[in-house]
Amino acid sequence: MAIQNRIADFHADMTAWRHHIHETPEVAFEETQTADFVAGKLTEFGIAVHRGLAGTGVVGVLQGEGKATGKSIGLRADMDALPMQEENTFAHASKIAGKMHACGHDGHTTMLLGAARYLAETRNFSGTVNFIFQPAEEGAGGGKRMVEEGLFDQFPCDMVFGMHNWPELPPGQMGVRPGPVMAGADRFEITIQGRGGHAALPHLSVDPVVVASQLVLAVQTLVSRNISPVECGVVSITRIHAGTAYNIIPNEVKLAGTVRALTAEIRQQLEDGLRHLVKTLPPAFGATGGLIYHLGYPPTINHDAPSVIAAEVAAKVVGAANIRDNLGPSMGAEDFSYMLNARPGSYVWLGQGGSALGCALHNPRYDFNDDVLPVGASYWATLVETVLPRVA
C-alpha cells in the first residue's frame, strides 16, 4: 500500500487521538469536547478554524502553496457517538455511561485530522481544502443542518467527499461505486382504531389487533408485489403496542416502522402505498387507520465523475487489486446525502476487518481498527493532491 511516509511517521499520534475521542463519546449536537479537541489540533497544525455551523460543527480551511487556482474541495468526517452502553474492557473504552463510539466516527475524525496535519506540513497542492467535521450524523441530521446554515456558501467546494469504515471489507480494501450507495430512511407511526370490549364476546367489538395483523401482512406486499424485482426497497414494521389484559379487546393498536429506498421514485412509491393501505384496509373491518409519516435522510447517491476520481485515488493508496467496485448498496442511511445533493462528490468504504475484530457497526463490542488510520488519512491526502495538483 502507498501510505504517505509522513503519515506513517505519526501513526502513534493518530492512535492516541482516536483513543482519546473514543474514551469521551458525545452524542448528536453535544460534541463540545470533541469539537474543542478537533479545533485545537487544527489550530496547532496552522489551519484556519471556523466554528458554529450546526452548533458543534468545525470547519478547517487550508490554502495550498501552489499558484491560486480558485479550485476547492471538501472532505467530511462525522464526530458523534451513539446512545448505547459499551461492553469493551480495554483501556480506551468509553468513560461515559450510556454513550459509545460504536460506528467508528472516532476513527473518521482522526483520519481527517491526520490528513489535515500532513497537508498543512506539505501544502503540495493548489487551491483550498475545507476539512468538514460534522456533528449529529446518527439520525439527527447534522449534515442537513450544516448545508441549510450555509456550509457551501461560506466554504465553497467544487466537490465534496466522504468516507466510512466498513467491517465487511478486510483492512487494505476500499469500496467505491457511482450511483446509490446508501438508502433513504423514513419512519412512520400507524394507529388502528377499533372498538374494544370483552375478549369472550368479540362479535360485539371491532378488534384492532386482527386489523393490525392484516395490515402487517399487507405491508409486506408493498415491495414484493409492487416494486420491480430489480429495484430495492424495504418496509419493516418494528413495533406493535396494544392491550392491557388477556381478556380485553383494546380500542386501538399502535404500530411503527421504517421505509428504505435507493431512489426518490421508489421512496415515494412506498410512501404512497403505505398511505393507501392505512386508509383503505381498516375500514374493510369496520375500523379506521391513521398514519404519521416522517421523511428522514434521502438516498446517498454518488456522482459519476467524482467516483471515478475517488476510485483512481483509492487505487493509488491500496492498489487496484484491492478496490471493490462491485459492492451492492447498503440499506442503511447516511446524512452525507444532503451534501451530495448540494455538491458533486463521492462516498467510499474503507475496509475495517469485521471478521478479525469480531463484530459489526453499532455493536456494544465494536472498536475502530487503528491499523487502518494511516490508510484513510493517506486516501484523503492523496485525493487532495490529485484533485488540486500544485501549479507553479
Image: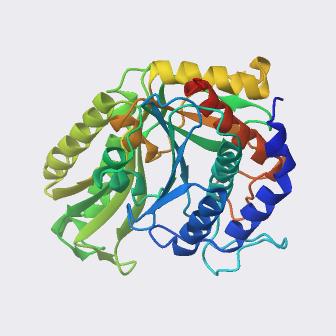
Residue at screen point 18% across, 41% down: 276
Quadrant the C terminus occupies? top right
Left or right: residue 213 versus residue 137 is left
Res 332 seen here: yes
Of 279 and 313, which appears nearest the observer?
313
Q: Where in the figure is residue 64, as x and y percent of width and height?
A: 57, 38
Foreground of the two, 340 or 299? 340
The one of 300 and 317 positioned closer to us in this rendering: 317
Q: Which quadrant is the N terminus positioned in?
A: top right
Q: Is 181 on the left-hand or right-hand side of 43?
A: left
| Vertical arrangement, residue 339 with respect to residue 81, above or below | above
Residue drawn at 72 percent across, 22 percent down: 315
- Residue sitting at 77 percent across and 24 percent down? 322
- Left or right: residue 321 compared with residue 308: right
Residue 167, can we see it? Answer: no
Towards the viewer: 385 or 319 = 385
Q: Position of residue 224 (x, y in %)?
A: 40, 29
Q: Position of residue 87 (x, y in %)?
A: 75, 71
Q: How is the image coloured?
A: rainbow
x and y, in percent, of residue 168 in the image: 71, 39
Q: How many marks?
A: 0
Point 75% across, 28% down: residue:
317
Q: Left or right of 191: which side holds 83?
A: right
Picture layout, residue 147 above or below residue 50: above
